[in-house]
Every structure is written in C-alpha cells, then in structure tokens.
Amino acid sequence: MSADRPGHDRKETPSGSGGGLRTAPAGRTVVVRVPATTANLGPGFDSLGLALSLYDEVTVRVLPEPGLVVSVSGVGAGEVPEDETNLVVRAVRHGFAAAGVEQPGLELRATNAIPHGRGLGSSAAAIVAGLMAARGLLDGVTELSASTMLAVATEMEGHPDNVAPALFGGLTIAWMTPDGPAYKRLLVHRGVSPVVFVPTSTLSTKLARSLQPASVPHADAAFNVSRSALLVAALIQSPELLLAATEDRLHQSYRASAMPETDGLIRMLREHELAAVVSGAGPSLLVLGSDPAQRLRAADLVARHAHTSWTPLMLAVDLGGATVVPHPAPGANVPLVVPVSK
C-alpha cells in the first residue's frame, strides 16, 4: 500500500445529481468485523500498532423512523451502555456527520470478543466499527473515505496508534501532521508469532497515561529512537532481533507501579530471552515470538510464575483490518467483503 498522508476532508459531497439521497435508505444493513490491536510494541510509543486476529462484530440496520435500538452480547454485556452514549453509536453518528448527511434511526447489535480495559484496543475497535458501519450504510449515497475515517477515529480516540491498525490491518506506523493523522502499513514477517496474556484486572488508559512524565532524559529518548527503528526491521524482515528491538525506556517503567505483576512477568520473560512488552496501556502483556515455539514456551513460563490467572491468546497478525459485509435485499449483486481502501 502507499504511504499515506490522509487529508482532513471532514465534509464530503453526496454523489448523484441534485445532491443525491440525504441519508442511508431504510432497511439497509451491514455487518462490520474489526480486529483487536496492540500498540507501542515496546519502544514505539504512540506510533506503532499491530492488528491481531481477535474480532468484535457489529450489525447495524437503518430504521424507517427516528430512534435507536442497541443490544450488546459477549464482552461488556450488561456493562456497555445501550443508548446514544454507546461508543459504536457515537462513531456511526460522527461518520454520518462527517459525510454531511442526516442521522437516521438505527438498530445496532454488537457481539464483542475483545477484552475491555486490557490494552487490546477495545475503544479503537468500537470507534472503527461505527465508522465502517456508516461507510457501508452510505454506499451509493456518498463516499466516506479512508482518510476521513482515520481523521475522525483519531479525533475520537485521541491518538492514531490503535485506530490505524484496526482500520487497515497489519503493522502500522502512525504519526500526526499539520493536516491530520497519517500512516504507513507494512506486512509482518511470517515467522512473527504473537501471544497476548490477559489478566482478570483492568487498567484505564487515562490512568496509565497520567503516570508518564512531561519529559524524559535525552539518552532515553535516543535509546527509544534506535529501538523503534530496529523494531520495524525486526517485524518485517528479521524476527531474530525482536528481543533487542523491544527494549523500552520511554513509558513502561513509569507505568510499572500501576501493574506490578505485568511488570514482573515481563522482566521474567525477557530474562528467558523472550520479547515481552506491555500491550498498549496494559495490563495485558504481549510476547512477540520469532517462531510459534517461542510463544508456547512463554505460555508455560507464565503459567508457572504468575501469581494470578492470566489467559493466553495465541493470535495471528490480522492482515485485512476492518471489513464490511453488506446484507442487501435478496437477489442484489454486491461484493461479499469490502475492506477499507488502502
């Protein structure tokens, strides 16, 4: 895919003569699937993200009248709001607003698998799911571009490191420009074998970020620059360098007090020459194995050393990012799966 400086094209013109339709047609339904993500990957703070093969699925239908019906099953059922404050609903509304069309009534059914508050991009997935749903519902009405979705998602999330891989898949490098967020998507070496260890406890991203100092020593900043560059090379070409490439002095040590068992397990795993890091803001931990055998060894070590229960998730790198499956009227001829345009 190309490198990629999306514009901040927040208002887009509906297609068709005379301005076209002003909202999605009643009855139109889409099913959206969005991957979990892990950000930072050690030294790549607020820049690097990786899409993983664990998915939330959302079905959205346009109602014939104004209103909202929301149901949530799976992770977060009974806890996630089922009204206009629902993050997926808010993202759908932002998508329609960015496209300059009227807000229709919506029925939304969410089936969640991504753990909440564990550093696996659950909020980014919700935001991307809503924007992708808006895009699918507006197909043939107006275009909601990939660049607009990245800009809106970044504005809602606060930073692009999780929303970029959720949208586009694979390994992404994301950064901010005067014109908005930009990204580059890269293919990961086939030997890279991620495993995420998910604890029963949660940690808010806001709390984790509050532990960051306003400035860091120059030597630590230089250290992370070198390791971030090395990490990109390790992930796309040389997985044998992952242990050295995932060293960090910028954020993990400052957050350790909020997740002491995560910190202890990471230190233990790294002593056994496994590339262990905090997944996103934590408290989950990520091991980037250079082959499948390494993640099995990591799972055995965590099982033997952990003081509490940790769930290992043996995942693949998701290559496609978020997708939309349209459900049109019977007999209509449409593509089966529509990924985000890269």
Image (tube, helix red, strand yellow):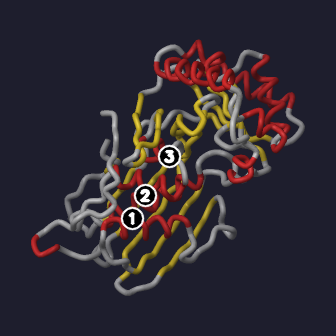
Question: Viewer-nearest of labels 3 and 1?
Answer: 3
Q: Alpha carbon of mark 3 to alpha carbon of mark 1: how far?
A: 17 Å
Tell whether label 2 touches label 1 (CB within 8 Å).
yes
Q: Residue at x 48, y 52 (%)?
A: 154
Residue positioned most to the left: 17
- The residue shown at (42%, 46%) is 181
Mark 3 — residue? 160
Q: Residues within 10 Å of mark 3 (few under 14, many from 20)?
A: many
Q: CA distance from mark 3 to mark 2?
A: 10 Å
Going by the numbered disc 3, the residue's amino acid type is: Pro
Name the element at disc 3. loop
Q: Residue at x 85, y 34 (%)?
A: 306
Q: Nearer the viewer, residue 280 or 323?
A: 280
Q: Quadrant of residue 295?
A: top right
Q: Within 10 angstroms of label 2, few (less than 14), some, or many (20 or more) residues?
A: many
Quarter occupied by the C terminus: top left
Q: x, y percentage for residue 166? A: 48, 46
| Residue at image mark 1 | 95
Residue 295 visible somewhere in the drawing? no
Which one is earlier in the sequence, the residue at label 3 or at label 2? Answer: 2
Are the residues tagged 3 and 1 within 8 Å (C-beta)? no
Mark 1 neighbour class, 10 Å CA radius: few under 14, some 14 to 19, many 20 or more:
many
Badge 2 marks a residue whose secondary structure is helix
In the rendered structure, which disc, 1 or 2, sits on the residue that comes first in sequence? 1
- Provide the secondary structure element on which disc 1 rests: helix
Using the image as rendered, state which of residue 222 and residue 49 is in the foreground.
Answer: 222
Residue receiving disc 2: 152
Mark 3 or 1, nearer chain start: 1
